[in-house]
Image (cartoon, rainbow, N blue to C red):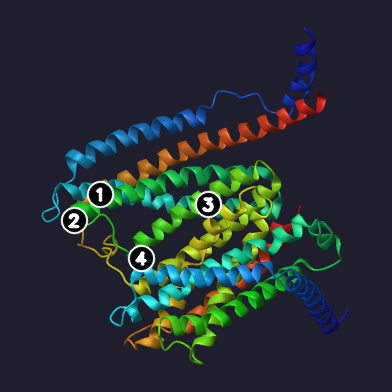
């Protein structure tokens, strides 16, 4: 088989699994509604915890935004493989003559899509609640790349923790230490939109570099994690 | 008795491929060497090494802190290498080595954080700062704990071994990235003073080298013991599983 037709087959496999997941989510509506409400609640809690005012807003707002995004993402990420396992469909998915990387990419794109929708709804609410001038076009690449970094690691590890009894406990313990660079870069890049500081490293470029490194590692190792 | 007959037969059968332990001469020799080295190091650290003119007595923590930190990092590399070779060769002995190194590494990382904190309190006047090395050590500690928790939740299975290997490989590549990104964020740790000539008096370098070698020997002894322990745990659980099948 030529390279092009292999690639076409791979893409159709990814799209088929992604389409299945989107249909499942649209019918059940469990994950993304829960994630969205959770993100809003984190904003409310942050408002009381830090008493956001004009003086400290620029320092605290990017952090509050990303804590809400990362926590909400993990809620959805934990369901990725666990939902398949509970429904008994994981074995059938693995029995399909499908490249393991196609399964991983489909799950990753699905997670990115649902987290992205939640963030799109949460961002204007955040901007309105805290009256921060954050809802600008420059924020979109930062949010996209930051979310991608969290989703890459989270999707990989959700496959590991799905087999355990304590997956809700274990997933954050595995994911949080590894996504530290992504969180630092995303928070700094978001902060730079509010106050321009001199001598800042190119955070957006670093964020993209971290994503590329993590994605290649995840694609290399996913088949070891998912096999029974 | 019937019970003994029932359980006795499979035990012998399963025990046959396991080598009878001979006297662990190499291990004993290494242990003796490590013990002697540690005794000489402790004498050298407290009595031979000169007292630092500025930092005073608390500078002697440095002779414990540096070897312990080096072994904490070495250990994580061993965990990742063991995991990678396990994924490649599918020989479970490499996984036992990785698990043993993770247990040793968790202890040494804890010691790194404790000795570093004590030194920081005496010298900087604070237990903790969010500088690159401190933050990276803390993340390393979290990774060790996450690794051990993941392994214990998944049990003694090949799923557990593969998941651990993937976590360690991701971790070993991520740790330098974490170090650099925190560095870009902010930093305060004293830079390494070994390379530049004349920065440290020769007596200090001598004691540091002695202490590095002794701690590394001690680590080797510990790693061998932990490896044997992990190996025996896996063999025992396998025997137990066979007994239940027979019952």
Please say if A176 is above or below B232. below
| Residue B25 placement (x, y as % from top left) | 51, 27
Query: Residue B146 bears which disc, if any?
Result: 3
Mark 2 falls on what kind of element?
A: helix
Please say if B30 is above or below A64. above
Please say if B67 is above or below A56. above
Query: Residue B123 bears which disc, if any?
Result: 2
Instruction: Give the alpha-carbon distance from disc 2 to disc 1, as whole Å.
Output: 9 Å
| Residue A180 placement (x, y as % from top left) | 46, 67
Instruction: Give the alpha-carbon distance from disc 3 to disc 4, as whole Å.
Output: 21 Å
Q: Chain of mark 1?
A: B
Query: Which residue, given by chain and number where applicable, does mark 1 sit on?
Result: B118
| Residue A115 placement (x, y as % from top left) | 61, 75
Tell us which disc is closer to us: 2 or 3. 3
| Residue B243 placement (x, y as % from top left) | 76, 25
Residue, x 62% and y 72% (percent of image)? A215
Residue, x 67% and y 69% (percent of image)? A219
Tags 3 and 4 both on a single chain: yes
Tell us which disc is closer to us: 3 or 4. 3
- Extreme-bottom residue of the structure: A137
Mark nearer the N terminus (2 vs 1): 1
Mark 1 falls on what kind of element?
A: helix
Name the quadrant containing residue B247: top right
Mark nearer the N terminus (3 vs 4): 4
Instruction: Give the alpha-carbon distance from disc 1 to disc 4, as whole Å.
Output: 18 Å
Query: Which residue, given by chain and number where applicable, does mark 4 sit on?
Result: B132
Mark nearer the N terminus (2 vs 4): 2
């Amino acid at each position: 088989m030529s390279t092009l037709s292999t690639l076409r087959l791979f893409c159709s496999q990814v799209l088929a699994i992604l389409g299945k997941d989107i249909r499942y989510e649209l019918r059940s509506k469990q994950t993304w509604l829960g994630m969205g409400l959770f993100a809003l609640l984190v904003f409310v809690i942050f408002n009381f915890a830090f008493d956001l005012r004009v003086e400290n807003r620029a320092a605290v707002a990017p952090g509050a935004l990303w804590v809400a995004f990362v926590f909400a993402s993990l809620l959805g990420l934990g369901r990725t493989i666990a939902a398949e396992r509970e429904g008994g469909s994981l074995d059938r998915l693995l029995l399909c003559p499908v490249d393991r990387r196609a399964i991983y990419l489909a799950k990753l794109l699905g997670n990115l899509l649902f987290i992205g929708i939640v963030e799109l709804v949460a961002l204007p609410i955040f901007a309105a609640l805290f009256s921060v001038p954050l809802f600008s076009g420059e924020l979109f690449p930062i949010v996209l790349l930051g979310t991608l970094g969290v989703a890459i690691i989270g999707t990989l590890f959700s496959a590991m923790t799905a087999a355990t009894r304590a997956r809700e406990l274990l997933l954050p313990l595995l994911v949080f230490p590894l996504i530290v660079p992504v969180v630092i870069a995303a928070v700094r890049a978001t902060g730079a939109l509010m106050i321009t500081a001199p001598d800042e490293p190119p955070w957006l470029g670093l964020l993209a570099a971290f994503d590329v490194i993590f994605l290649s590692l995840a694609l290399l190792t996913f088949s070891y994690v998912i096999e029974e | 008795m019937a019970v003994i007959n029932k359980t006795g037969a499979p035990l012998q059968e399963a025990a046959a491929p396991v080598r009878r332990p001979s006297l662990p001469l190499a291990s004993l020799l290494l242990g003796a060497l490590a013990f002697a080295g540690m005794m000489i190091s402790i004498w050298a650290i407290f009595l031979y090494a000169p007292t630092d003119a500025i930092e005073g007595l608390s500078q002697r923590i440095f002779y414990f802190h540096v070897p312990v930190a080096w072994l904490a990092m070495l250990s994580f590399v061993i965990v990742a290498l063991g995991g990678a070779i396990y994924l490649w060769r599918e020989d479970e002995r490499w996984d036992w080595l990785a698990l043993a190194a993770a247990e040793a590494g968790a202890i040494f990382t804890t010691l790194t954080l404790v000795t570093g904190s004590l030194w920081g309190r005496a010298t900087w006047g604070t237990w903790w700062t969010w500088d690159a090395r401190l933050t990276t050590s803390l993340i390393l500690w979290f990774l060790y704990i996450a690794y051990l928790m993941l392994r214990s939740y998944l049990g003694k299975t090949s799923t557990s071994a593969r998941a651990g290997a993937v976590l360690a490989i991701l971790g070993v590549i991520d740790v330098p990235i974490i170090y650099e990104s925190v560095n870009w964020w902010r930093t305060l740790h004293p830079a390494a003073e070994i390379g530049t000539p004349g920065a440290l008096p020769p007596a200090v370098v001598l004691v540091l080298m002695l202490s590095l070698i002794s701690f590394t020997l001690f680590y080797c002894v510990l790693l061998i013991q932990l490896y044997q322990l992990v190996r025996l745990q896996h063999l025992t659980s396998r025997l137990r599983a066979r007994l239940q099948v027979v019952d």
